[in-house]
Amino acid sequence: MKTSATRLKRLVVKIGTNLLSGKRASEGHVMETVVRELCDIKTAHGIDVLVVSSGAVGFGMNALGLERRPTLLPEKQAVAAVGQSRLMHYYETLVGAHSPGLTTAQVLLTQADLDERRNYLNVRNTLVTLFGMKNVIPVINENDSTATEELRFGDNDTLAAKIAAKINADLLIILTDVDGLYDRNPDRDKSARLIAEVAEISHDLDAVAGGAGSIASTGGMRTKLSAARIATAAGVRCVIANGFREGIIHGVLEGDAPCTQFLPAHAALSHRKRWIAFGRSVRGMVRIDDGARAALLERGKSLLPAGVTAVEGQFESGAAVRIVDSAGELIARGLVNYGSDDIRSIMRHKSAEIAALLGHKDFDEIVHRDNLVVL
């Protein structure tokens, strides 16, 4: 599908570790050409361009002469601290050399920055203000130097999708070291076929998604598929393409580059629903029976205690939880009105019994429909 640059208003490009620092986290050959393309697109068409860049750990490994990726969290954080400054120096140098009128802005985030609604909106306001300056290309990365495991996005594919959803991007391009999603592993099966277009991301696609890439990388095709789910649910078209191909971004926009594109949902989630579904950290899981599943999916109802069969995790009221059906399939996320202990006490009971069971009754629902997103 051709997307002329003249029709784009906002573009997010995610650049993976392998493209920046190579399979062994030491040689980078793609960064300059990608930056040149982005500068050309921004200066020629005035598009809001945002980069989500991996590479801090890879660049740190290179600077420190490390052959193996650190495994302990303090070591990862220290190596990332070394690498992040080098990574941004390269971006600023390349942008300034190719387009002297442009500059970069560094934005480092952790999941905690999106957990609270106010912080979530502040991040968006900062990015929109940077776009308003007209000559800035924001470069976003996870703050690997401070993020603990529970506060991590997990991978920059997810971060890129959440940012694309947050800023109402028209297109998210995830650059990696393959042409896109194949119907089977092309390294093992030479007859594997590139899937050019995906109208709906079904669970069957998970089976063909691969594992992690190089020693410096944490993401694989499965994380890119999850990112595409987030982006398309927010109404953002998503493309997975090969960053090693010369002129790949222009090729994607002109529709003549091999890639996999995921079409956006017809009805995009509201910004509040996006925050509930993808912004907040999930604190636990609620399992529901078939009757509750039908009520949520077919009749647009709230989740009542009678339909809950099990609870996993410890969380307080207001927490974001996964809602799964009797088969364990994820069907929704939502903000709970009761903590995990209270839900265990009232599950399988009618709403009219809540006061007697808990000694108080604040809500009839475990999750109100307004605080629930069907996935």
Image (cartoon, rainbow, N blue to C red):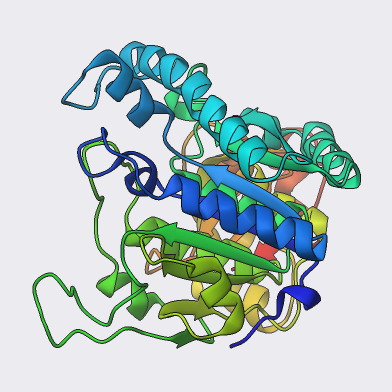
Q: Residue 119 appears at what percent x and percent y?
A: 79, 31
Q: Residue 180 appears at what percent x and percent y?
A: 37, 72
Q: Residue at x 28, y 14 (%)?
A: 64
* Quadrant the N terminus occupies: bottom right
Whether residue 1 is visible, yes or no, is: yes
Question: Quarter-wise, where is residue 283 in the image?
Answer: top right
Q: Is residue 358 above or below residue 274?
A: above
Query: In the visual, does 90 lie left or right of 373?
Result: left
Q: Is residue 239 above or below residue 102?
A: below
Whether residue 338 is visible, yes or no, is: no
Q: Nearer the viewer, residue 322 or 312?
A: 322
Query: In the visual, does 311 lie left or right of 10?
Result: left
Query: In the visual, does 64 lie left or right of 51?
Result: left
Q: Nearer the viewer, residue 108 or 28?
A: 28
Query: In the visual, does 194 lie left or right of 282?
Result: left
* Quadrant the C terminus occupies: bottom right
Q: Is residue 150 above or below residue 15?
A: above
Q: Residue at x 29, y 24 (%)?
A: 62
Q: Nearer the viewer, residue 38 or 7?
A: 38
Question: Quarter-wise, where is residue 4 in the image?
Answer: bottom right
Q: Residue at x 89, y 41 (%)?
A: 133
Q: Is residue 315 above or below residue 244?
A: above
Q: Residue at x 36, y 21 (%)?
A: 60
Q: Residue 84 appears at what percent x and percent y?
A: 49, 23
Q: How many marks?
A: 0
Q: Residue 312 appears at what percent x and percent y?
A: 45, 42
Question: Quarter-wise, where is residue 341 in the image?
Answer: top right
